[in-house]
Amino acid sequence: MSELLIYETLEGTTGVSVRMEGETVWLTQRQMSELFSTTPENVLMHLKNIFADGELVEPATTKDFLAVQTEGQRQVQRNLKHYNLDAIISVGYRVNSKRGVQFRQWASRILREHLAQGYTLNQARLAEKGMAEAQQAIDLLARTLENQALVTDAGSDVIALIAGYAKTWRLLLEYDEDGLNLPATCQPARGVLDYAQARTAIDELKAALFERGEATDLFGRERDDAIQGILGSIEQTMFGEFLYKTREEKAAHLLYFVIKDHPFSDGNKRIGSFLFLLYLQQEGMAMNINANALTALALLVAESQPTNKDLMIRLVVNLLVSSDTSHTHS
């Protein structure tokens, strides 16, 4: 089902009717020209260049929708080509980057809100309630993801993961924040993930994703010195001792901080997951968290409440230790 929303620029000078369907939003060529204060011909020129350069693939970013148009004194229905958020932002970079960033922020917020539409998943209450309510919430989450198709490049895999690991999540939900402790088998870190190493790896990831049309210029663009601050906080000391004493705690905090603190203009969940895996590899830790599990874990962290930070950290640490244990005994 499509839904029409009204986007208004921060200046309040322009209002555009935005179509939302599935995991993205859609605009026509003319609507983009209104959004970015340019001509439809200019938008079309940039779209042609974007597709010709291979930055995006046209069939994957366009879709025809039936729209009502006023022609003379009558209204007619016509199929109009619409372009998704990736194409909209790519045009925005070229003609009005400020408005492009504003629209991306608005669209991201709207999509997050609609991901949660139809259910309330309050982690604090969920931890206090019984097994039946936890299972109901998980079932509802799975149905919402399936019906709304709101998880890009994950979709059915995440649904299958939720169903397959439902018992695991239910058992974890029996514990409150004081009940899920850090395992005694955690080990000290062997090295440090420094900024230069992380930046090089992020640039290589961006190049690979950009080539496949899965990243834009905003991907990996740093906000001030935020990522350096995060990497420094992982290694911070207090009274001569590391604040996070084990490699598992450092890995968990790295994943959490990059996803929740948004040190990049775009791609925080992907980059957070990537640096998390990079750190596991550096520390020689078992890589038994598969792609689907990592996707679900990143989404769980992203949607968690700040008050549940300690619980999220403990959950990740326990998963890492469990992964290492199963790897050792395999």
Image: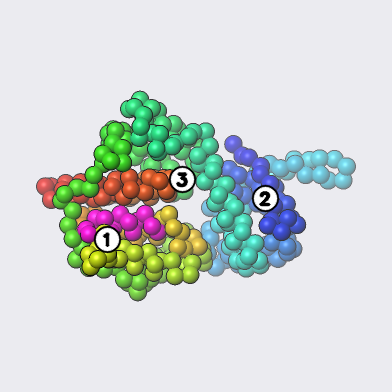
Instruction: Give the label on residue 68, or none.
Output: none
Give coordinates of residue 267: x percent, y percent. 45, 59
Q: At 38% from the left edge and 27% from the top edge, which residue is drawn?
A: 133
Q: At 13% from the left edge and 50% from the top edge, which residue is drawn?
A: 328
Which mark is first along the chain, 3 or 1?
3
Residue of label 2: 7
Q: Is residue 119 visible?
A: yes
Instruction: Give the label on residue 151, or none.
Output: 3
Q: At 31% from the left edge and 41% from the top edge, which residue is drawn?
A: 177
Q: Is residue 146 visible?
A: no
Judge the density around disc 2: few (<14), some (14-19), many (≥20) Cα neighbours within 10 Å: some
Viewer-nearest of discs 1 and 3: 1
Residue of label 1: 243
Residue located farthest toward the right when viewing the structure as drawn: 73
Give coordinates of residue 195: x percent, y percent. 35, 71
* Residue 243 higher or lower than 77, as above or below: below
**Number of marks in the rendered image:** 3
Give coordinates of residue 209: x percent, y percent. 43, 62
Give coordinates of residue 63: x percent, y percent. 60, 48
* Residue 134 higher or lower than 3, as above or below: above
Which mark is first along the chain, 2 or 3?
2
Amino acid residing under circle 1: Leu
Q: Is residue 253 magenta?
A: yes
Viewer-nearest residue: 13 or 36: 13
> What residue range appears in magenta?
245-258
Quadrant occupied by the N terminus = top right
Q: Is residue 50 magenta?
A: no
Which SS class for mark 1? loop
Q: Main secondary structure of the magenta part?
A: helix
Judge the density around disc 1: few (<14), some (14-19), many (≥20) Cα neighbours within 10 Å: some
